[in-house]
Amino acid sequence: MTKTSEQVIEELSTQGYSRIPRVYEPSRAAEALAKVRELYDVYKNKTSEDVPFLNVGQPTLYNLQNKDIFFLKFMFEAQILQEILVHFLNDKWFKQIEKGEPNYILRSFIARSSNREMPLHIDSFVPYEGDHVFIMQFSIILQDQSRENGCTIVVPKSHHAGEYATQDFHKTALPIESKAGDVVIWDSRLWHGTTANTSDDTRWAIIGTFCRWWMKQHWNIPKTLPQHIYEQLTPNQKAILGFCSIPHDDETAGIDLKRGYDSLRENVDEYAIH
Ligand SMILES: O=C(O)CCC(=O)C(=O)O
């Protein structure tokens, strides 16, 4: 790896994004690419028709955490990513989970290729100014990205704009050309999108979106995670998947919104509302 977490944190704070070269060996990225291709073939026709306009027609494999334990192991093996997320997304007043352990949660975990250009957008829902980051995304590059095959583009420093993205900047946005095994990470307030993929090939990347423990996950991850995958996770990984952030059924079950590992159950079906 050619960057330290301190360098990445500095770039994220000032520019709003960072490319970390060679987080994964290209051969490891190739393994992930093969899994994505195999599973995309299985799931591509099984998605809801209720698709937001940014995703329409874009090849996407959703909810990787449910599909194969491979993807969670793959994500968690990159220690630097967890260090960066702890720095930006941990709630320092959260006492129920030991200080320094993650208390942020996974919002969504997908693989996406690229075909038409993706408009500039933010993924924080609201633009705001300030140093508190609430949502971050990383893209694990599985195939080399260039302007020709739909690379990620960003408007540096726009995470501090305090405004929604406008398309006037699409042509001048910075293309992030990257290699398989790199990771590109950004503050979700950053204006970002992609170029069009004019090549004959796919452009797969794995996108993990993370948020503060009190925000809403994109899907009901705790309810849908298969038991056999749950059993293979450590308590801190279960917390990242949202298992310490499920609301209590009512006041008889508990009052405190903040919950630690002692609230974790043996089986996923024990989380069902009774
Ligand atoms: O695939 C990319 O490079 C960008 C993805 C993106 O903008 C998103 O998932 O919000």
Image: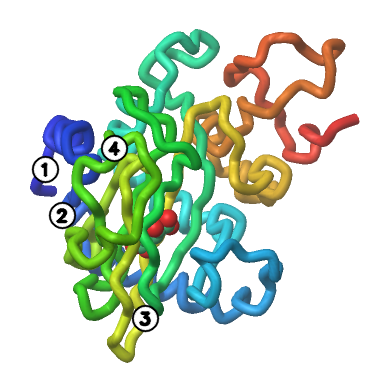
Kind of residue indicated by mark 4:
Ala
Residue of label 4: 161
Dot 1 amino acid type: Lys
- Which of the two marks, 2 or 3, is nearer to us in this view? 3
C-alpha distance separating marks 1 and 3: 28 Å
Name the residue carrying label 2. 21
Disc number for residue 3: 1
- Which residue is identified by label 3? 202
Q: How many marks?
A: 4
Image spot of residue 18 (x, y percent)? 20, 46
* Amino acid at dot 3: Thr
Q: Residues within 10 Å of mark 2 (few under 14, many from 20)?
A: some
Q: Nearer the viewer, mark 3 or mark 4?
A: 4
- Alpha carbon of mark 2 to alpha carbon of mark 1: how far? 7 Å
> Which badge, 4 or 1, comes first in the chain's sequence?
1
Of labels 4 and 1, the one closer to you: 4
Residue drawn at (53%, 43%) of the image: 107
Q: Is residue 121 left or right of residue 3?
A: right
Q: Secondary structure at mark 3?
A: loop
Residue 72's label in the rendered image is none
Q: Quadrant of residue 235?
A: top right
Give yes or no for contact between labels 2 and 1 (Cβ–Cβ under 8 Å): yes
